[in-house]
Image (cartoon, rainbow, N blue to C red):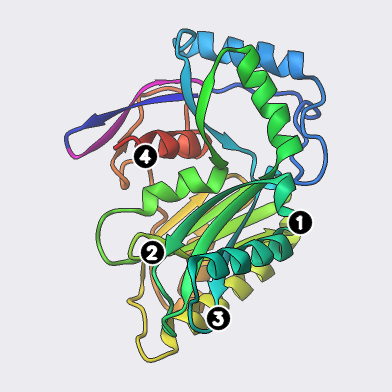
Amino acid sequence: MVQLDRSRGGFVIRRASTITLPDDLIRPQFDDSNISDPAQLMAALSDLATSSGLLRQRKWSVALPEASTKTAILTLEGTAGSRSEIAEVLEWKTERAFGAPLDELRIAREQLSANEQRQARYLVTGVRLAVLAEYESVFTALRWQTGLILPRHAGEQQWLRNGTPSNGLLLTTHDEGFTAVLMRDNQATTLRSVLCDVQECDDELHRLLLFYRDRTQGGDEPSPPMDRLLVLGSLLDKNHVAAVVRDTLGISLRPLSATDVGLTIPAGDISFDSIAAAAGLARLAW
């Protein structure tokens, strides 16, 4: 739980607190129930708000667990038609990508820049209405107004947006594996959710970087080299990831810290990894 302020040259954490939940209280899933005991979760969030000094705060943005949502970049092949035709194609592609009827989903959609073939692309995030209702019922009981609810990586990737033409890679880990977001000119160009065990991470990361290399070095307009690397979570060792990037892409990058992205965290037990998603959502206010 984070409250963020703008400061000269960056951002500063004004208030922040974390809490460790019981392992079985939240079981992040896209298709099934997530919260085993809403009353227990409500009490935990109330305690968290109290410890962070934000008990009276009513307006919130929320980062949901990664596995509770699905995100895809959808490309419209061919020549764009009317608005209604584009909407129909996007609806069909969304249902195919998420494996669920559109009337069972809450969808957020952002148009991205066109690809090298000048095809329209959209970043689409979805959560099942039944899953979202579980979380919203807890927020309502707390009398919270949640104006923005997004997956964890959507908050974390904000720290790769530095206002300059550059390429960046976010790797954020969770219990089921990791999510990778490739950024170009402050927009997501590729997103991959990789389900794997810890011992499989190296192979999956290597495949991802080979894909990135082929994607950015091919075509008529090769991308500038990757110059920003953000690794979050405990499943991947940051220095090891940097070594894999160097061996695969021939680029030496130091994983970004809070200071590198312009975020000041007061001294204490709060880590950048634990609050990057929440602080990134708060950053969207500016």
Three-letter code for the amino acid on which mark 1 is drawn: Asp
How packed mark 2 is, by other alpha carbons closer than 10 Å (few <14, some 14-19, many 20 or more), is some
How packed mark 4 is, by other alpha carbons closer than 10 Å (few <14, some 14-19, many 20 or more), is few
Question: Which residue position is annotated with label 2?
Answer: 253
Question: Which residue position is annotated with label 1?
Answer: 197
- Name the spot of residue 277 as percent of width and height, x first: 49, 39
C-alpha separation, residue under disc 2 versus residue under disc 1: 25 Å
Q: Residue at position x 60%, y 61% from top? A: 72
Residue 12 part of the magenta segment: yes
- Name the spot of residue 232 as percent of width and height, x first: 52, 47
Q: Residue at position x 54%, y 73% from top? A: 75
Q: Quadrant of residue 73?
A: bottom right
- Name the spot of residue 16 as percent of width and height, x first: 44, 22
Three-letter code for the amino acid on which mark 2 is drawn: Leu
Question: In which quadrant of the rendered image does the C terminus lie?
Answer: top left
- Which is closer to the viewer, label 3 or label 2? 3
- Name the spot of residue 155 as percent of width and height, x first: 47, 43
Kindly state the secondary structure of the residue where label 1 is placed: loop
C-alpha separation, residue under disc 3 versus residue under disc 2: 35 Å
Stretch in magenta: 9-17
**In the displayed structure, does residue 87 sit left or right of residue 102?**
left
C-alpha separation, residue under disc 4 versus residue under disc 3: 31 Å
Residues at circles 3 and 2 in contact by the CB criterion of under 8 Å: no
Question: Which residue position is annotated with label 3?
Answer: 77
- Which is closer to the viewer, label 3 or label 1? 3
